[in-house]
Amino acid sequence: MTLRDRYEAVVRRSVAQEVDQVETLPLVLIQACVEVLPVDGAGLSLTRELRVPLSASSALVTQAERLQTTLGEGPCLTASERGEPLVADLADLRATWPLYCSELVRLTPFRSVASLPLPGPDGPGLGAVDLYFVAERPVPLAALSEIRSDVTDQVAALLLGSSSWLAGDPDRADPDNVTRRRMDVWAAVGMVVVGADLDNRDALAVLRAYAFGHDLSLDELARQVIGRYVPVAALLS
């Protein structure tokens, strides 16, 4: 099996096991990355209108992803801006993002990062997948070509609803509208992850509870959270 075949098999299997298939798709996609790639962790973020972490393979990765959002610097943001993959060993991290590197070393065991931008419908800049390594020197840059074509490009297609892997999804009748609603929900989840120090599943549960208690749909609440009409603190009160 090719890397793409293995990744597709893991995604299909995991989606079939999820109760909340749509809302938890980013988590499924990033956990599948860890299963098929030689990495110690992986994270997925949006980097368009606002930089928010969508999912992380572990609590340590959540911490590493949150650092980039909090500090406003890191490999994910740089890779997304350039539209090209990058690999940063420990020396690169220190030289390019010194504050991020200092906190990454202090708070996590990760010592190198590879970041791959996700193509959007109108070019690069949708987001990025970060691959984390305990070793000080990660995979060579040349190895990212296969990972990009077989894994991260598929991540982008699945997020945008343009992949045939989930062809049975009943929402595909209106892909543009559905994609917009899903992105809103995922972005709101990411904002709660950062603002309330929760993992993805708990953040989603908080949003659902607030929506139910205020007679809102999850989509409606997500738009209000993204627009700052409902602050994250209000979700927790």
Image (spheres, grey):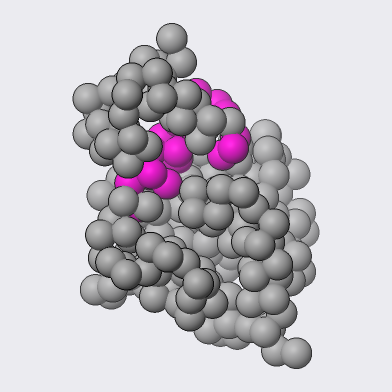
Relative side of 146 to 36, left or right: left
Assess whether residue 103 is covered by the magenta stretch. Answer: no
Q: Is residue 8 above or below residue 40?
A: below
Q: Please tell me in which quadrant of the rendered image residue 147 appears.
A: bottom right
Q: Is residue 7 above or below residue 191?
A: below
How many marks the image carries: the answer is 0
The image position of residue 34, as x and y in percent, is 71, 62
Identify the residue shown where x is 45% and y is 38%. 189
Q: Is residue 20 above or below residue 229?
A: below
Foreground of the two, 220 or 144: 220
The image position of residue 3, as x and y in percent, is 68, 83
Relative side of 217 to 145, left or right: left
The image position of residue 233, as x and y in percent, is 39, 16
Identify the residue shown where x is 37% and y is 37%. 218
In the picture as drawn, the residue positioned furthest to the top comes out as 237
Identify the residue shown where x is 40% and y is 18%. 213
Foreground of the two, 220 or 192: 220
The image position of residue 106, as x and y in percent, is 67, 34
Can residue 102 be spotted in the picture?
no
Quadrant where the image shows the N terminus: bottom right
Q: Please tell me in which quadrant of the rendered image residue 132 appears.
A: bottom right
Assess whether residue 192 is covered by the magenta stretch. Answer: yes
Principal secondary structure, stretch drawn in magenta: helix
Quadrant where the image shows the C terminus: top left
Identify the residue shown where x is 58% and y is 82%. 150
Foreground of the two, 163 or 81: 163
| Range covered by the magenta-colored residues | 183-201
Can residue 206 be spotted in the picture?
yes
Foreground of the two, 174 or 109: 174
Relative side of 85 to 7, left or right: left
